[in-house]
Image: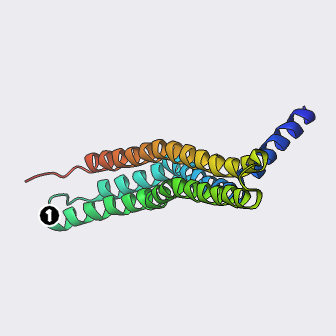
């Protein structure tokens, strides 16, 4: 079992080394992005439910649900829960957008290395150029995979958050005169 772990760790280390320093930056970005997404999932299943229950309880305690003031209180309850629910989503979306940009940065730095090898060796050493090509393609792939996976997950979280707000609005009924 230890050998399998050690072999896997060596393969990951080799992959990261072939991708260059930009790949480490992409890995850090993906760690932060997925941490935020998992935090949102945890929040939706724990804290949000408590916040929703508290807002519903506060609304149900009110005797007046018809006046302008009651409407403003209802709007404030929905806004408070909505803000807690949606505030990290723009950060997640920004990190999703940055993923392919970092991949592009890896492409550029890898191609600079290829051009440098071509200039030094006269373009005849394909083995040395392959290291630069790897540094160009691996970060590009990692950035795109990180962006695609992040798009699906962040869209799901956004949809789930919007649905939760709609459900709260439906449950905070307003009695019309």
Residue 136 seen from this side = yes
Check the picture and name the quadrant holding the N terminus. Answer: top right
Q: Nearer the viewer, residue 149 or 145?
A: 145
Q: Label 1, on which residue?
A: 67
Residue that appears at 73% across and 46% down: 130
Could you tell whether 129 is left or right of 65 in the image?
right
Could you tell whether 1 is left or right of 149 in the image?
right
- Residue 93, percent across and down? 45, 56
Could you tell whether 58 is left or right of 115 in the image?
left
Dividing the picture into quadrants, the one containing residue 7 is top right
Residue that appears at 54% across and 54% down: 99
Q: Nearer the viewer, residue 47 or 91?
A: 91
Residue that appears at 26% across and 62% down: 75
Toward the right, the furthest residue is 3
Check the picture and name the quadrant holding the C terminus. Answer: bottom left
Q: Residues within 10 Å of mark 1 (few under 14, many from 20)?
A: few
Toward the left, the furthest residue is 177
Q: How many marks?
A: 1
The answer to whether 37 is drawn above or below residue 79 in the figure is above
Helix, strand or loop at label 1? It is loop
- Residue 102, percent across and down? 57, 58
Residue that appears at 46% across and 52% down: 48
Dividing the picture into quadrants, the one containing residue 122 is bottom right
- Residue 108, percent across and down? 59, 59
The image's colouring method is rainbow
- Residue 25, percent across and down? 66, 59
Residue 45 seen from this side = no
């Amino acid at each position: 079992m230890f050998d399998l772990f050690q072999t896997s760790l060596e393969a990951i280390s080799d992959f990261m080394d072939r991708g260059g320093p930009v790949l480490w930056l992409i890995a850090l970005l993906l760690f932060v992005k997925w941490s935020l997404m998992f935090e949102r999932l945890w929040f939706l299943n724990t804290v949000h439910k408590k916040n929703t229950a508290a807002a519903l309880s506060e609304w149900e305690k009110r005797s007046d649900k018809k006046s302008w003031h009651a409407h403003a209180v209802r709007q404030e309850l929905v806004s408070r829960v909505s803000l807690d629910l949606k505030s990290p989503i723009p950060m997640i979306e920004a990190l999703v957008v940055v993923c392919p940009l970092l991949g592009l940065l890896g492409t550029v730095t890898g191609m600079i290395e290829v051009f440098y090898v071509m200039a030094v060796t006269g373009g005849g050493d394909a083995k040395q150029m392959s290291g630069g090509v790897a540094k160009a393609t691996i970060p590009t792939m990692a950035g795109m995979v990180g962006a695609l996976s992040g798009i699906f997950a962040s869209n799901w979280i956004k949809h789930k958050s919007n649905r939760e707000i709609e459900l709260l609005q439906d449950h905070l009924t307003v009695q019309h005169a």
